[in-house]
Amino acid sequence: MNPNDLATRYRLLNSSFKKTMIYHIGIDAGFFTEYTYMLHAILYCLQHKIQFKLYSDDANFGWEKGWEDCFASFCEQVHEPFHHTYNTHRLPSWQALMKDKKLPKTKLLKWKLKVTCKNIIGKTIAFFTYGKPVLLNFQLTFNPNQHFHIPELGIDGDYLHTFQKLTEITWKLNDTTAQECRQCAADLQLPPQYAGCQIRGGDKITETNLLPPEHYIRLIKEKTAIRDVFVLTDDYRLFEQVKTLAPDIHWYTLCSPDEKGYVNSTFTQTTKELKQKQMARFLSSIQILMDASVFIGSITTGPSLFLLKKFYPDIHPADCLLKDFPQASVLPIPGRGQVATEFIQGNSTCKGT
């Protein structure tokens, strides 16, 4: 199926709905977390016949036009500035917050109360701005464990089937970014057949245990005879490690020698020029991994999880069984971290993946 035709059908279907949701992307999480949240919102709107519109003027991955800094538009966008303050992600329930042992209960309660008040103000402003009730981010609830049926878009299946359809609609780089990606790939001089993996460092260690470079080297040698490997990493020291540990493999990366680990909060506050450069290299790396003959990635990192979901079942998870991937893919990060830890501890040979 031609993705352009699917995108056109989506536009027509989406614009036919009378109810409206305005989704705010790029609030406070990493790019692929924000992107996945957006896909969930799109799917929710399709299921409930709600027109999806996007607000991205302040997207933390953008520098001038938000979504369109990197991607082609796929829906109508709005630009009212109140979304910056009042259109926020849904917070955990009161009950869930009370179970959180990391912060004092009084601080959590004050935070929840403050955000709840902002949500009420946001709903009110949206009503007077658009002249009708409009759904905002915090009003969404999404359950991936169901069958999705949207015949107009050829969607009739589980979450992973639907996720792949929605990426066909939304994942289209704009002309400038696409050209930058092609140039980056050309500069690397990759052979026609190569493998790919992501080895994460940086702030991800605060969320989950990270797999060592040795684990990826072993899996690459187990899963393929290809000895040209592109590595997406945010820490050049990890790239140097794999080159030292496996000199029989030709390693490639777009990571620069001065990078010592990605920290999302630092990236979002960087200059326009540097952010533009970093996003171009990051998206170039993703496109290169999309074109790899073999990809090995962890279920605990955003880019890898995106690629594993997009190309399932023709994938090689680094830290779970292939048969367990559909269930693991919809878990929150603590759940995926637990699955990965149990897999590494109990099945270090990764049999069955």
Image: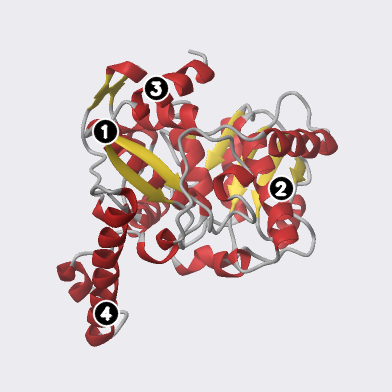
Looking at marks 3 and 4 on the same chain, the residue that comes earlier in the sequence is marked by: 3
Residue 320 in view? no
Q: Does dot 2 land on a helix, a strand or a loop? A: helix
Q: Which residue is mark 1?
A: 18
Image check: 284 left or right of 248?
left
Q: Which residue is mark 2?
A: 281
Specify the farthest residue to the top: 1
Q: Are marks 1 and 2 in contact (CB under 8 Å)?
A: no
Looking at marks 2 and 4 on the same chain, the residue that comes earlier in the sequence is marked by: 4
Q: Which residue is mark 3?
A: 12
Is 269 placed above or below 174 here? below
How many neighbours does mark 2 have within 10 angstroms: few (below 14), some (14-19), or many (20 or more)? many
In percent of width and height, residue 336 lies at 36, 52
Q: Which residue is mark 4?
A: 108
Amino acid carrying label 3: it is Leu
Amino acid carrying label 1: it is Lys
Q: Name the residue rendered at 44%, 62% in the picture.
A: 84
The answer to which image quadrant residue 287 occupies is top right
How many neighbours does mark 3 have within 10 angstroms: few (below 14), some (14-19), or many (20 or more)? few
* Distance in Å between CA atoms under marks 1 and 2: 39 Å
Q: Nearer the viewer, mark 3 or mark 1?
A: 1
Looking at marks 2 and 3 on the same chain, the residue that comes earlier in the sequence is marked by: 3
